[in-house]
Image: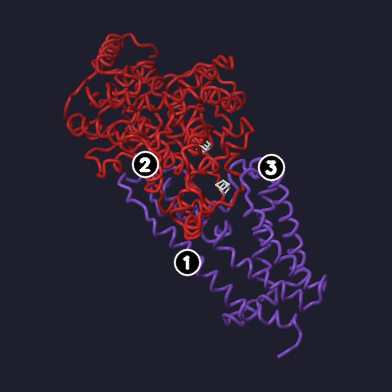
Chain colours: A purple, B red
Amino acid sequence: MTSDPAMDLLMWARGPGFQIATVVLLFGIVLRIVEILALGRARDLAPPKASPAQSGLRTVFSRFLPRHGMAMRSPVIHIGGYLFHAGFFIVLLFFGPHIQLFEEGFGIGWPGLPSPLIEAVTVISMVALVAVLIARVRDPVRKLLSTFEDYAVWVVTFLPFLTGFMAVNKLGLPYTWMMALHVLSVELLMVVLPFTKLTHAVTFLFARYYNGWVNGRKGAAT
Amino acid sequence: MTAATLERGLTALKEHIDAPVAAFFSSCVHCGLCAEACLFYTETGDPKYAPIRKLEPLRRQWRREYTLVGRLGALLGLIKPLTDDELAEWAHLIYDSCTMCGRCTLVCPVGNDLTYMIRKLREGMAASGHARKGLVEAAKKTIKLGSPMGVQLPALNAQIRRVEAEVGLPIPVDVAGVDYMVILSSMEVIQFPEIIGALARIFDRAGVTWTIPSSGFEATNVGIQIGSRDIAEEIVRRVVEAAEKLRVKYVISPECGHAYVALRWEGPNLLGRPYRFEVIHLMELLAKLRAEGRLPLAGKHDQRVTFHDPCQIIRRGGIDQEPRDLLNEITEDFAEMPDAGIWNWCCGGGGGVSAVDEAEHLRTKVFSRKMCQLDEVHPEQLVTACANCRNIIEEGLEAYNKDIEVIGLTELVAEYLAPDETAPAEGGDGS
Ligand code: SF4
Ligand code: SF4
């Protein structure tokens, strides 16, 4: 037993905390997928013009690219959106200490990227997140669409970057505290993901597939 | 029809929510991009017209009924059920400011098919008595008289006789065993009867056997627009019965956007069975005849023309190249508008909006989008393949004081049929 509360917290976060978050994340994702699939859909009796499944799969990938004219109409959302999403996965998957965790957990590792690069990506991601937030409050449509959840989710997404950056650069609280907060912020993200719009991380696959399926069978572009 | 009540509306919404709807609502990130694709937003700048916002009642019903969190919330009284007042308020967003054009569906980054959901939400609106009066009246007329504009057989017969005299060809009615059955939209019968003559000439030249049915000739389907499965089914059934009675191989979906959607895509599902004939859109048929060498064309139209893609044919129907091939063949100066093809902008009157009085002002306002497109190409004539688009565009051009003639593609094609050398000389122009 240590008598260092920061270390205790970090140990809890890395141990039971992480386990709880993982269980909630997995349970939540399964729940959301079941909620979708359980509803089912009627068989379509109209003879298709093209293969619906093929179109569904194609749409899953084609929607990664900007759509006609949209990047010009909403440049910040596009640039910020791409940078942030890319940054998130780069930092998550290619930061040395993260890879170590994956190695401990799953027994497989891979080469990481140099720390200065990861730090740059982190800063870019945070700037991108701030930019899309500003674009959210300044655009009348996004402002109208936004609820408390949109802002809360923004904070929850931003925190892991911020705490990670501060911990690595020994900013703010002492290192152990910062690390504990970093791990906890990630766990918070994991816990809210299935129950907020962050679910799109998984359900976009279904949404795009269905869209491609429905319209592709008509021979229409998707 | 049973009386419309809130309860029936909510039940209808529940019944129409399926896996895709759940996937769509689960995935929305409130990025607002769908608004940028919708002419009701781009032309007004009013954020309330954001497509995803129009779907709010459906989203709430889904959340309350089909998510664990929503159900718990409802149990605790935190998530309130939809009220009549809310639905009434939403009628403007669901009926007046959505033409089901499908543009938003093409841009959503997470892949939401918003148009698919508007169609479903309208079921709930109609069942709860919040459909627009113009559509309700049109539906009643269709069920009682067979057509939303009250066009009945005598009116059609009168037009047929006029056309027969004009083109000197017989218009077959109720001829069994032919290959193709032609159905028409009321708008065509009343406003653009030239189409009947054009078809007669094209089919005569191509050696196509065809007929118009004396009942079940109405192609438009207000049931699809208002959002009523029952009405939609009844209207489709009339066409299907006529076609199967006459034992035709194909039914030709005419120059009418949503009629195609109704008959080609929704019909078999409404009836719960496949048809004993095929549905082919007129554009597809013309392309097919052309490919088979049965549509000899000659001469070139010398006016500067552009083509307006009807939403239901291009985006919800996949007919893209067919009209362009024809136009390239028969015109000298065919200029495409910016965003032509799958990204074309709606005329503003589709999806039943043209039948809604409350929408008239807004519809004219958002026509500014079409004006922008036209201003890039300055055509003398605009060609399209939907009688409703045609009517709306004519009205819009008039409101904006623009002198552009609007014509149907089939008529233009008929004008450029090559003279028949095997037939006795008729004194046709050209050769
Ligand atoms: S574009 Fe798609 S994700 Fe964005 S607000 Fe509209 S429906 Fe939601
Ligand atoms: S279908 Fe067309 S009119 Fe309706 S919300 Fe989408 S973009 Fe707007």
Instruction: Determine which quarter of the picture holds residue B376.
Output: top right
Can you say whether B247 is above or below A20 in the image? above
What type is the residue that disc 2 sits on?
A: Arg
Residue B318 visible in the displayed image: no
Can you say whether A119 is above or below B163 in the image? below
Q: Which residue is denoted by mark 1 in the rendering?
A: A30
Protein chain holding label 1: A
Q: Which residue is denoted by mark 2 in the rendering?
A: B8
Tell me the CA gap for discs 2 and 3. 37 Å
Instruction: Determine which quarter of the picture holds residue A110.
Output: bottom right
Determine the secondary structure under disc 2. Answer: helix
Determine the secondary structure under disc 3. Answer: loop
The numbered mark at residue B104 is: none
Q: Position of residue B244 (x, y in %)?
A: 19, 34
Q: Which one is in front, B74 or B389? A: B74
Image position of B141 (left or right of B93): left
Tell me the CA gap for discs 3 and 1. 34 Å
The numbered mark at residue A139 is: 3
Query: Is the CB of the residue bearing disc 3 within 8 angstroms of ligand 1?
Result: no
Residue drawn at 46 percent across, 40 percent down: B118
What type is the residue that disc 3 sits on?
A: Asp
Q: Position of residue B318 (x, y in %)?
A: 43, 39
Image position of B179 (left or right of B98): left
Q: Position of residue A67 (x, y in %)?
A: 58, 45
Query: Is the CB of the residue bearing disc 2 within 8 angstroms of ligand 2?
Result: no
Query: Is the CB of the residue bearing disc 1 within 8 angstroms of ligand 1?
Result: no
Residue B353 visible in the displayed image: yes
What type is the residue that disc 1 sits on?
A: Val
Protein chain holding label 2: B
Instruction: Determine which quarter of the picture holds residue B271.
Output: top left
Image position of A191 (left or right of A29): right
In front: label 2 or label 1? 2
